[in-house]
Image (tube, grey):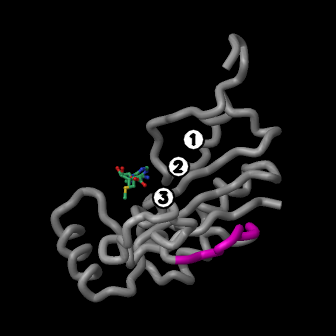
């Protein structure tokens, strides 16, 4: 990067429940006239239904210019074993996690065109050739990348 060039990435310590603040902070360094990448990996699951994850995702995505990509992944409620483990975790943690159906998780990317292979088990999203089968550890998360057109 040459001197004076705008930064290509920026980090902030912000609460995802306050998307307006995140966007305001980001606007200090990112050029919102050009495509932006938004990474929401394991983040929406931190929000309870009462906190309005759909509204928060829509607000963040709504602020992105066309051509932006959003990567999203979260744990699903498709395993009784994982549900029990997360319940136990939530009972003794300040941060709680909220498993949801794959359809609900995919709905956070509403309005975006999902790039291939769409919403799939996270371990199956373009795995590195020859990568180990990690079905056991990651079998109950789904993810997708959406393009804002
Ligand atoms: C499951 S981890 C995912 C971390 C990382 N994105 C990854 O994929 O490896 C969830 C992260 O969200 C953070 N977190 C929890 N509640 C949050 C909130 N309200 N706003 C922003 N981050 C939060 C946690 O501290 C934790 O680092």
For the stretch drawn in magenta, the main secondary structure is loop
Q: What label sits on residue 41 in the rendered view? A: 3
Question: Quick check: is 118 in the magenta stretch?
Answer: yes
Q: What label sits on residue 64 in the rendered view? A: none
Of helix, strand and loop, which one carries label 2? loop
Lateral position of residue 131 relative to residue 103, left or right: left
Q: Which residue lies at the image location 47% right of the left edge and 83% below the top edge?
A: 101
Of marks 2 and 3, which one's residue comes earlier in the chain?
A: 2
Mark 1, Cα crowd under 10 Å, few <14 / some 14-19 / many 20+, is few
Of marks 1 and 3, which one's residue comes earlier in the chain?
A: 1
Residue 146: x and y in percent read 69, 64
Q: What label sits on residue 21 in the rendered view? A: 1
For label 2, the residue is 18
Between residue 39 and residue 63, name the one nearer to us. 39
Residue 15: x and y in percent read 45, 47
Question: Quick check: is 72 in the magenta stretch?
Answer: no
Q: How far is disc 1 from disc 3 in space, using C-alphas?
A: 19 Å
């Amino acid at each position: 990067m040459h001197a004076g060039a705008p930064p290509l990435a920026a980090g902030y310590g912000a609460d995802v429940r306050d998307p307006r603040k995140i966007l305001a902070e980001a606007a200090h360094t990112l050029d919102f006239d050009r495509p932006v990448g938004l990474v929401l990996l394991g983040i929406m699951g931190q929000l309870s239904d009462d906190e309005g994850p759909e509204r928060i995702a829509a607000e963040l995505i709504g602020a992105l210019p066309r051509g932006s990509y959003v990567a999203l992944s979260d744990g699903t409620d498709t395993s009784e074993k994982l549900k029990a483990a997360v319940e136990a975790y939530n009972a003794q943690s300040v941060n709680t996690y909220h498993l949801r159906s794959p359809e609900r998780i995919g709905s956070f990317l509403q309005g975006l065109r999902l790039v291939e292979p769409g919403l799939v088990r996270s371990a199956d999203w373009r795995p590195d050739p020859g990568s180990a089968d990690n079905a056991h550890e990651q079998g109950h998360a789904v993810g997708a990348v959406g393009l804002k057109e």
